[in-house]
């Protein structure tokens, strides 16, 4: 598996969400046309996205909803448990810790962290809020896979560094800022530092959504269908 | 302008964020290579994304940061004021209303709405929380452009319908559910109802980010660079 567009992964997530909706309505069969319409893309795009990962349907027969759902969950790694810490327990961190549905996918919140003495020691969703100083030991002791960053933008880079340094493998960044891996100068070359080599950063940026919305309100004719496949 | 991939719009938003970072560090020139590296895509992709909207640089000279920033803001519609209401004032709605940076882009929160009698009447960020019954009149009276949906998933479709019915042009959906336009049966055909024709829906889905993160932790070799241009 090489050369899979990031947009394909985002769309797999959308297809999975649609399949769950179909299953909730006890609809057991679907097609690339049906998925395409619900996802706002073309049927060609659906078939192309799925083809990266195998053959899931029968030609002319479409897909069986629970089977395709199970296969997409396997592809996305959602059939296993992920241990998660939330860093930054202001309003946003609390909203994230209480976000509906996270635990449906085996995302288990195992630790909550902050630096604010007014917040450290409180209990949110049954977990104590710990001080960031405890993070490295906690991550090792609890086999933490992911950190969700909900700190103010000015503190995002430092908090991300703490997560990467502690050995977390993935960071979901909610701050409206780009997280950069730490770079080292080695033999005159800029190199990514060791602790960042295996770290994946994904962004959930509210502002990005607002900006895309502004663009599409100004250019509604560009929003009919995802046109990526015409490139 | 036709046939612009949605992924291009998302990347323009990323480039803009990078340009703002450069400007904050008083860096006045950049290049497609530099933007590409910071955004995690190829330089070819940067040039292709920008080329949809005009010629912004000088061959071999790169881009002037404040000029490219200003042009991207114009393209994205961020040089004008957008009036926003937030629907759902639980933890998430409060986090959104207080999210840092929204007001930097002329996103003006003009109204906050909920149905919970414990919340209606409270003040958040200097605005009273109003009951949803007041929404239609408020949207018309305050020229509301966008609604941010922060209600529980079960209520997202109804709240979106209320926003569309009130004449809002864009919905930013924070609930982990797909919003569907209302369909009508006309002359035996399914048609989008009038109030939904001009409505744009963008999703900010925390769970989608978590799922992409799970995929890339399992498949880290697929995360090196956006491979879209190789399609």
Image: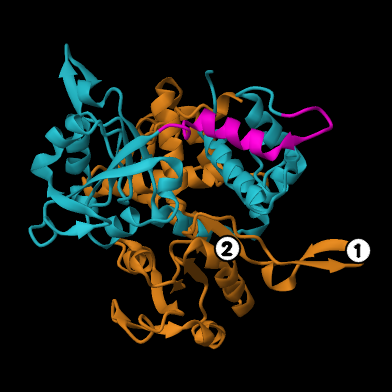
Chain colours: A cyan, B orange
Residue, disc 1: B188
- Percent of width and height locating residue A90: 23, 60
Question: Is residue A63 magenta-colored?
Answer: yes
Looking at the picture, does residue A12 appear above or below residue A188? below
User: Residue lying farthest top?
Assistant: A187
From the viewer's side, name the closer residue of B73 and A2: A2
Tell me the crowding category of disc 2: few under 14, some 14 to 19, or many 20 or more residues within 10 angstroms, Cα based. Answer: many
Which structural element holds mark 1?
Answer: loop
- Identify the image quadrant of the N terminus of chain A: top right
Q: Is residue A19 left or right of residue A13?
A: right
Which span of residues is magenta-colored? A57-80
Alpha-carbon distance for marks 2 and 1? 30 Å
Q: Which mark is residue B174?
A: none
- Percent of width and height locating residue B197: 70, 66
Which structural element holds mark 2?
Answer: helix
Looking at the picture, does residue B150 appear above or below residue B218? below
Q: Is residue A173 left or right of residue A155?
A: right
From the viewer's side, name the closer residue of A22 and B37: A22
Q: Chain of mark 2?
A: A
Which residue is painted at 52% across and 81% down in the image? B143
Question: Is residue B19 magenta-colored?
Answer: no
Q: Which mark is residue A217?
A: 2
Count the labels in the image. Answer: 2
Which residue is painted at 36% across and 80% down in the image? B119
Q: Quadrant of residue B231?
A: top right
Residue B185: in sight, yes or no?
yes
Q: Chain of mark 1?
A: B
- Identify the image quadrant of the C terminus of chain A: top right
Looking at the picture, does residue A187 appear above or below residue A42? above
Camera-near label (2 vs 1) is 1
From the viewer's side, name the closer residue of A141 and B133: A141
- Percent of width and height locating residue B116: 42, 79
């Amino acid at each position: 598996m090489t050369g899979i567009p990031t947009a394909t992964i985002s769309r797999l997530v959308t297809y999975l969400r649609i399949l769950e909706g179909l299953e909730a309505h006890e609809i057991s069969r679907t097609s690339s046309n049906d998925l395409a319409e619900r996802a706002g893309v073309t049927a060609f795009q659906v078939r192309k996205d799925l083809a990266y990962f195998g053959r899931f349907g029968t030609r002319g027969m479409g897909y069986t909803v629970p089977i395709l759902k199970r296969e997409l969950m396997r592809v996305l790694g959602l059939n296993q448990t992920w241990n998660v810490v939330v860093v930054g327990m202001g309003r946003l961190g609390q909203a994230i810790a209480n976000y509906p549905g996270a635990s449906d996918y085996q995302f288990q919140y195992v630790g909550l962290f902050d630096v604010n003495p007014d917040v450290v020691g409180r209990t949110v969703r049954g977990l104590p809020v710990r001080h960031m100083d405890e993070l490295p030991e906690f991550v090792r002791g609890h086999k933490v896979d992911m950190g969700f960053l909900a700190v103010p933008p000015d503190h995002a880079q430092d908090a991300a560094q703490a997560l990467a340094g502690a050995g977390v493998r993935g960071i979901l960044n909610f701050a409206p800022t780009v997280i950069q891996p730490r770079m080292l100068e080695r033999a005159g070359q800029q190199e990514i530092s060791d602790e960042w080599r295996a770290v994946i950063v994904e962004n959930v940026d509210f502002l990005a959504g607002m900006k895309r919305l502004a663009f599409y309100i100004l250019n509604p004719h560009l929003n009919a269908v995802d046109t990526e496949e015409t490139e």
